[in-house]
Image (spheres, coloured by chain):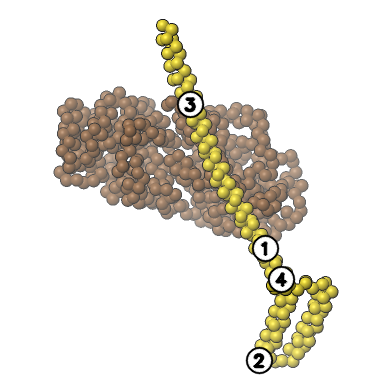
Chain colours: A brown, B yellow
Amino acid sequence: MPTFSIVTPVYDPPAEVLRACLDSVLAQTDSDWEHCLVDDASPSPHVARVLAEYAARDARFRVAKRSVNGGIVAASNDALAIAAGDFVAFLDHDDVLEPNALAAVRAVVDNDPTVDYVYSDEDNLSPAGEYITPFFKPDWSPERFRSQMYTCHLSVMRRSIVDEVGRFRTGFDGAQDYDLVLRVTERARRVHHLPFVLYHWRMLPTSVAGNAEAKPWAYEAGRRAVQEHCDRTGIPATVEHGAVNGVYRVKRRVTGEPLVSVVIPTRGTRARVWGVERCLVVDAVRSVLERSTYPNLEFVIVADTAMAPTVVDRLRTLLGERLTLVWYDRVFNFSEKVNLGAAHARGEFLLLLNDDVEVESPDFLETMLSLCQDPGVGMVGAKLLFADGRLQHAGHFYNGDPFHAFFRYHRSELGPSGLLVVQREVSGVTAACAMVRSCVFDEVGGLTPILPNNFNDVDFSLKIRRAGHRILWTPYAVLFHFESMTRAPAVLDEEHDLLKARWLHQLSNDPYGNPNLQPKLDSWIEKPLR
Amino acid sequence: MMSVSPPPSDDEVALRAAELAALLLERAASARGATADDPSVVAAEIASLRAEVARLRSLVGPEEDSFVRLRTDLWAARDAAIGSEMEAGQLRGRVTALEKELLRAQRNHRLITHKLIAPARRAKRLLRKL
């Protein structure tokens, strides 16, 4: 039995395109494969001729023909039925594999027998024959996968699991692969990402690669696939179409109404925002009270003893019984202030919030809380905007140094492959607005006081991930963050050195970035001459 | 052209306030004589008080309107400030994206120059010498 069965449903591709596809299989450096091709009753006579020619040339090409056209699901299932390999790799009839594609997958599955699903990076093959628009993917990121089919090509799965889940399902045409991978990853022991472009997706006018509007029904099928995945896995959510085609919003529901403690360190600073002077903490609290729709809140305000009594009075008037005021009389240390606030909090969840924020989306608490209630999730971050609407925070990106991803891009940027409009796993989030489970906060010992000003949130995030929890970022919880209005944003060398001493490897190996990206940048720019 | 009467002096305002207070006291006293069985008296009293309020409002009208206008102007100014800041942000965001693209283009240009063009030129010079 071969290790790999390459599965290809064939329906009327141009002869030269089909030949390029089959030649790329023949050129594989790993020879332990079979190519299962099912001709879905193609009307053009050249299809059968080309397939017969390759089958005659090499017995590893196994060709079957359907008497009537059954569509991609039926043809793919027919191809799976004749597959005998340990793993199945999916290849479209007009696409091309890199010569070392199977060898790269073999290196993974031979090394770790618990890997059940492998996917690689990919790019597009333009009509001019150029490899363009590479898609450098993150390591396995289940929340992002629920938001978009990002693993796509090349996908290689253990055949036994594909059979176990019932192969492709009818009714999901156009998103049949998304539906299959959702079901396979529900059972897979390990998922592995190969950060190499092993697959070239040909752009044809009728293909999704060439035209996002080509298959509108596919997006609805994708939405249904994710909804069914949520229902199967017990995620209480409604799946909606997202900001662009092929992106979905998994809108989770909050379970119960747990108490959320909003922890705000402050010294009662006043600042001019949008031309009007305001007391930052008072307006931050007011915006939460006025805009947020979540009812069960307490506010733990950690205030410098030097804070003006009028600010305290205004907070008392606004919050009444919901206010817990904690006085802080030491030299400024952000970590210590947050830890002190968390120690006084009674809630099951903490919302770490800076005093220089203003709520934009009314359901931001429900959005963050519902994600934080996922048992595997330790912390959730929000989309933060500068006063002029540019991105202040869209998740951390540890690319040699810690960065805010796409810092100072406009809020409406979609990001590469929709990165900025999907809920996704990130390596870290800013503590300016982060929801964390109280027990996770305690488990990792809160924020590190030896990082009093900067990077304490980076350190906190990495501690949470090291403890085995995932960190999510959502574009659906939006707040303005009038950053560094309360103090100068200076980073000391000692802070930088200390962070590197603690997390050198993690700062250069972000699993939600990609090794093909240029280091020391906040945006996704590929390395040159790859 | 419409004539504009000068605003009342402080003394005039005080006098009018005293007149109003006296009038209200007088009417309240007469209203106490009315019973619940006589709603027409109460309705007339309310109508007369409303008329008085309207008369007084017309006296201070320009100031009251100015205050409302000022407040509306303030809101509009704040909205305009936020709007222009957002528009500036959109442009700044675009500049950030273009700066990144420029960075990439400059880097690629540098690399092509150093790794391809410069060696080719060196080889060409060498061939000429030979």
Q: Secondary structure at mark 4?
A: helix
Query: In front of the other: label 2 or label 3?
Result: 3
Looking at the image, which residue sits at the far right?
B11
Per the rendering, the mark at residue B62 is: 4
Residue at horizontal 45 percent and vertical 39 percent from the top: A416
Q: Residue at x 44, y 49 (%)?
A: A243
Can residue A428 be spotted in the picture?
Answer: no
Label 1 marks a residue whose chain is B
Sequence-wise, which precedes: disc 4 or disc 2? 2
Kind of residue at badge 4: Pro
Return the chain for callout 4.
B
Q: Chain of mark 2?
A: B
Identify the residue under disc 1.
Answer: B71
* Image vertical order of residue B20 relative to residue A50, above or below: below
Which comes before the other along the chain, label 2 or label 1? 2
| SS category of the residue bearing label 1 | helix
Circle 3: residue type: His
* Placement of A88 over or under A377, stated as above or below: above
Where does the image place residue A446, in percent across and percent down from the top left? 61, 40
Q: Residues within 10 Å of mark 1 (few under 14, many from 20)?
A: few
